[in-house]
Amino acid sequence: MQRIATLSLLVCFYLFTACNEKPEIIYSDYLPEEKALLDQYLNLPDDLDVYDPKFLYNMVNAGVVRPRLDRRKAVLGRVLFYDKNLSKDGTISCASCHKQELAFGDNKAVSAGVYGRTGERNALPLSAVVSFASQYGTDNNGTSALRFFWDNRSETAVSQIMASMSNPKEMDMHLDEIVAAVENQPFYSVLFEKAYGDPQVLPERVTEAIASFVNAMGSFQSRFDQGDSDNPSGYVETNFTNFTAAENRGKTVYLQNCATCHSSRMTQTALHNANNGLDAELTGDPGVGGITGISSDMGTFKVPTLRNIALSAPYMHDGRFQTLEQVVEHYNSGIQDHPNLSPALRTDAYGAPRRLNLTEAQKQDLVTFLYTLTDESMRTDRRFSNPFK
């Protein structure tokens, strides 16, 4: 009887201990066999990454709408974005011209495509925006949305992706070839199943998934954003407490001379396209005019926002400027009298090109300020990195 009582006490003790322990519980969005397959090829976490942005106060105050993103499609899109098998010679992916450490831009004046073919324009840095999903794409944001490419020819991320994949100077693939390339890799069956409920690979699913990943991109955690968010006045013109004196002076120079076109908080630009006086005459690249056929659009190009500008050299649609100092000097003293030169860059509506006439100190302060637009977190965020082993 005593032995039975002792055993009962021991059982109760172990039960009590077990109930009060906090065993490690590992949650996974994948079945064990699915994760085992993925792990052969990819570095993906057990739990699917969340891509919804968490804006600082300054972007909320500026009215930037926080998008809701499908994380399963974004994870699939991340893998597709980095997959070189989606190009004709197996050497080029979307990430080849949009490198994470360079604000998803390129350090070449003009990027190289399959078989070493040279493109026509500088690769736009994808991290130059607050949020693609909140600002780009007529499907998301209506007719006032920003468009893709230097000539604004694509209205949506999907159409932009299709154009790049099929461009002979980029990836040179037809959609049926892309589908075949995806189907030949065993791990995609798991990712398509998670994103779409079945493993079927369809052209529209491929482009939608990549678009989901691109739409998840954005940059809103720079020192500029932190200073703007912590600023009690709410006015961007007020000195930021996390800035040096030179950075605050540079911000003033920027607001007085650059913000009219590029926006004061680097959100949506006032102009969708403009000629900035790089040349006095129309060169071989007509820009937006080549798409619209409108004479006043000839020689005009997208007006980008400047987030992460210090990471995205060389500059301009043709990559002609290697440094920010050269860019500043162009606006300071080098604007050419092109027939379609933006009125904002003239002394008056029909006057001569403006000359900022900044001092050497002011020019250096402006460059110093532009470095505060760098978002170091986006450069290293694992969610946007190459998932391939």
Image (cartoon, rainbow, N blue to C red):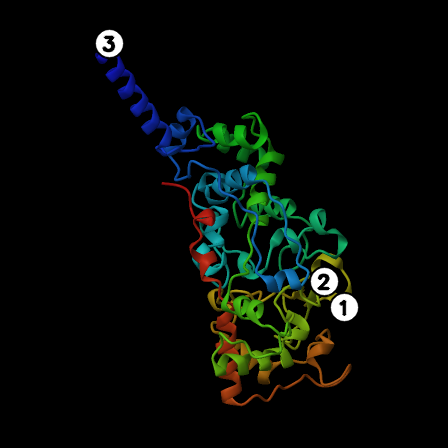
Foreground of the two, 296 or 154: 154
Expressed as whole percent of the image width and height from the top left, the position of residue 323 reads 47, 73
Q: Determine whether 175 is above or below 337 in the image.
A: above
Foreground of the two, 241 or 237: 241
Q: Determine whether 246 is above or below 189 in the image.
A: below
| Residue 264 visible in this rendered orientation of the protein | yes
Name the outermost residue toward the left.
3
Expressed as whole percent of the image width and height from the top left, the position of residue 63 reads 68, 60
Numbered label attached to residue 289: 2
Asked if the residue under mark 2 is in contact with the one under mark 1, i.e. CB atoms within 8 Å, the reply is: yes
Sequence-wise, which precedes: disc 3 or disc 1?
A: 3
Q: Amino acid at mark 3?
A: Met
The residue located at (73%, 65%) in the rendering is 297
- In the picture of the structure, the residue carrying the numbered disc 1 is 296
For the residue labelled by badge 2, is the local secondary structure a helix, a strand or a loop?
Answer: helix
Crowd rating for badge 1 (residues with CA inside 10 Å; few <14, some 14–19, many 20+): some
Q: Amino acid at mark 1?
A: Ser
Q: Quadrant of residue 318?
A: bottom right
- In the picture of the structure, the residue carrying the numbered disc 3 is 1
Asked if the residue under mark 1 is in contact with the one under mark 3, i.e. CB atoms within 8 Å, the reply is: no
Cα–Cα span, label 3 and label 1: 102 Å
Expressed as whole percent of the image width and height from the top left, the position of residue 110 reads 50, 60
